[in-house]
Image (tube, rainbow, N blue to C red):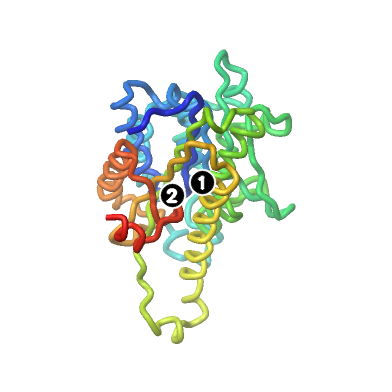
Amino acid sequence: MNPFRKNVAIAIDGGGIRGVMVTRALMKLEAVLSKPCSQIFQLSAGTSTGSIISAGIAARLTAETMYKLYVRLGETIFKKSWRTMFFPLSKYRYPHGPLADALFSAIGDPKMRAFWDQETPFDVVITTFDLLTNKTRFIKPWKEEYRDWSVITSVLASSSVPTYFPVVDGRLVDGGVGSYANPCYVAAYEAQFCLHWKPEETTLISLGTGREPQTTRAGQPANFWPWQWIEPTLGAFLSSADEQQVHLVETFFNKLDFRRFQIDMKEPVQMDDPASIPLLATYGDKLGQMILRDQYDNIAMGVTPEQIRFNG
């Protein structure tokens, strides 16, 4: 692994229970560097499950602690009930209570300003989408508008995937509803224009939560019923937005030491499937090895499979 520069930031994608693989990958990074993530990074940006991990890093939780939280609480947060049984007759599948309780047990109930006002300030960017203004909000500990926001409320807002969790404060839903399921561009912008880090002195680590395999077959879409368009259309949006954010960082922050890591999964994994945790842990170990070996996500970072083969 090439050494990091003076300033180090991390951006973590959304993905529900698939955040397990990120915590496992970060466990490997902590082991090699012999320090917790809160001492490796000075800025964390996250969407949805990425906001949970980003806030955890800022709150000085180790990657192992966060991994154990996912393992222990997966079944509780995504517990099957009458809501899941009768969905979509119910408005959402899972209540916020178990996730809020888990966050409280792990970090207490600090305000966002606590991250910035400590002796060594730590910057966090949590994305959420505001349905009333039709815009993405970027919740930060130094920004006056958000300093007194509860960290738990901020994370719940970022994690409230529509139909899975209820809307927060009558208006806020998952940050991935906008263009920032992958918040790497947000992190690059925050580092250079808000924290005034010099790009040539900055490393940005961007972690995905798994690229699902292509399951649509040739000719199949011609026979889709209306409801069958939902999943491929959403997948196309998320995939395009993901790669767009990577492209923006490469284009406008080309002096940055930008490292994007992503895993190609062999099977689809639902964001609310805690039974997949052992599999996700295995993927996370592979993701961690990719970080340590500087095996970047070539496809997202503008290198095609053909170019990879051509270059040997």
- Given contact means CB atoms under 8 Å apart, are the residues at marks 2 and 1 in contact? yes
Rendered location of residue 305, percent (x, y): 35, 61
- The reply to whether residue 71 is in sight is no
How far apart marks 2 and 1 lie (CA) works out to 7 Å
At mark 2, the secondary structure is helix
Query: 298 and 77: which one is in front?
Result: 298
Query: In the rendered view, does 62 fall on the left or right side of 227?
Result: left
To which residue does mark 2 refer?
Answer: 16
Task: Kindly identify which numbered label has been placed on residue 48.
Answer: 1
The x and y percentages for residue 300 are 44, 54
Q: Nearer the viewer, residue 310 or 135?
A: 310
Indicate whether 262 appears above or below 63: below
View extreme (top): residue? 119
Looking at the rendered structure, the number of numbered marks drawn on it comes to: 2
Quarter of the rendering occupied by the N terminus: top left
Residue at the image position 29 percent from the left and 52 percent from the top:
276
Amino acid bearing label 2: Gly
Residue 105: image quadrant is top left
Q: Nearer the viewer, residue 257 or 124?
A: 257
Residue 49 place in picture, x, y as percent: 47, 44
Whether residue 262 is visible here, answered yes or no, is yes
Mark 2, Cα crowd under 10 Å, few <14 / some 14-19 / many 20+, is many
The secondary structure type at the circle numbered 1 is: loop
* Quarter of the C terminus within the rendering: bottom left
Mark 1 neighbour density, 10 Å: few (under 14) some (14–19) many (20 or more): many
* Amino acid type of the residue tagged 1 in the rendering: Ser
Task: Residue at 43%, 45% (x, y): give it.
Answer: 260
Q: Is residue 51 above or below residue 91?
A: above
